[in-house]
Amino acid sequence: MRAAVQDLAYGTLRNLGLLEAVLAALLHKPVKPALYALLLAALYQLRARPRASHTTVDQAVRAVSRTEPAAKGLANAVLRNYLRDADALVARCDSEPAHYSYPQWWIDRVRAAWPQHWESILNAGNLHPPMTLRVNCRRITTAQYLATLAERGISGEAIGPQAIMIERPVPIESLPGFSAGEVSVQDAGAQLAAPLLDVHPGMRVLDACAAPGGKAGHILELADCALTALDSDPARTRRIDDNLARLGYAARVVCADCLAPAGWSDGALFDRILLDAPCTASGVVKRHPDIKWLRRESDIASLAAVQGRMLDTLWQRLAPGGKLLYATCSVFPQENAHTVESFLARSSGARLLPLAALADGQLLPDAQHDGFFYALLEKK
Ligand SMILES: C[S@@+](CC[C@H](N)C(=O)[O-])C[C@H]1O[C@@H](n2cnc3c(N)ncnc32)[C@H](O)[C@@H]1O
């Protein structure tokens, strides 16, 4: 039931651009928000499960009769009119937002930033996300874990040193060793962060925007270090504790604003800092399709300003010779390369280190992983 409701909600949001265009062609006057949403979900269901069209119309009309009885006839007419002329109707919805199912400003930004890749970036965001695991290399090897999965009838493929992509997603409770911390669920692109940070045993490490603790856990799997994990959101900070407890690692977990070091810093400097900054999350829309519709274009500049302030503040907490990894899950250069270029231009003593795996720091999203940006900065 939960899976079916999730598919309905996520599928509707993934295809919202087209569904809204189709509904606009079918409606002659505005309807109340609840009816509008229900019709969009019903249209998604009609497109996704054409063979069940009679059941879909029947259930949608019954739902309307419970919430807005007077609109029952209208809902019935709209959905039946769609079925009568579906292909021609969809063909007439030829605007870019209908075709790609993104707001126009988003399409324009991605096209301007990535003239060679813009369509594949947009299309990747409309795919179903894979389930990817991170194997805890301190407990078990990736090959051993793949064999354990196979014994349970779960097929997977190694797509990174610790990353296994599961062929068909399964509930996490059915993953062998999950509660014992042998494995975590984490996108393969996100798994690049901890190795890039180059942490060694005994180092003082700060994860400045750490919740829910995915990358913090990975850092501790790679090296026995003194980790401080900060996040400003109390509920999300509790999830860092839960994640680290499951993995069996300890860190100093603090709910605090990383922009106000007086609240969390004892004055000692860090050897490594991970700044996984708040961003538009434009690289992870296949996991969170609502992002496409909730973001405003103006968010990019506001977030870039915060990201710049975070870089300036945290840089002061980095020891000479130390490294700071700046990360976002965005594909907009304003939050990525531009943020880092502006920081380098106003800071003396900062050097951008080359990343062997990612020439320009940008990992563009595809079927296997989400989109991320990484920049490794060294303090001279
Ligand atoms: C991209 S998420 C971090 C994901 C995390 N690194 C992981 O791998 O699980 C960004 C986080 O930054 C936190 N955040 C936003 N503003 C902050 C601030 N001023 N100080 C500390 N944390 C902040 C948010 O609450 C959010 O949890």
Image (cartoon, helix red, strand yellow):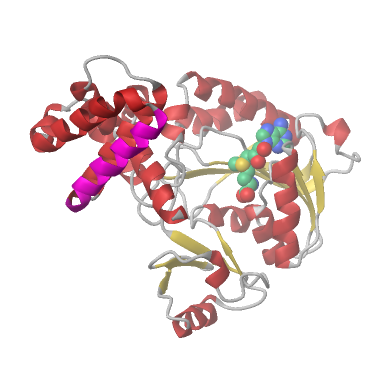
Magenta stretch, main secondary structure, is: helix
Q: Which quadrant of the figure has residue 61?
A: top left
Does residue 57 belong to the magenta stretch?
yes
Residue 353: x and y, percent?
Answer: 58, 45
Q: Which residue occupies 87% across, 39% down?
A: 265
Q: Which residue occupies 75% across, 48% down?
A: 238
Query: Residue placed farthest to the right in the image?
Result: 266
Split into quadrants, the picture shows ligand 1 in the one at top right
Highlighted range, magenta: 51-67
Q: Which residue occupies 19% across, 29% down?
A: 77
Q: Is residue 164 above or below residue 271?
A: below
Q: Is residue 324 above or below residue 150?
A: above
Instruction: Report the quarter where the N terminus lies.
Output: bottom left
Using the image as rendered, state which of residue 45 and residue 137 is in the foreground: 45
Residue 32: x and y, percent?
Answer: 38, 20
Residue 170: x and y, percent?
Answer: 46, 66
Q: Which residue occupies 48% across, 37% down?
A: 330
Residue 185 in sight here: yes
Query: How many discs appear?
Result: 0
Using the image as rendered, state which of residue 290 and residue 361 is in the foreground: 290
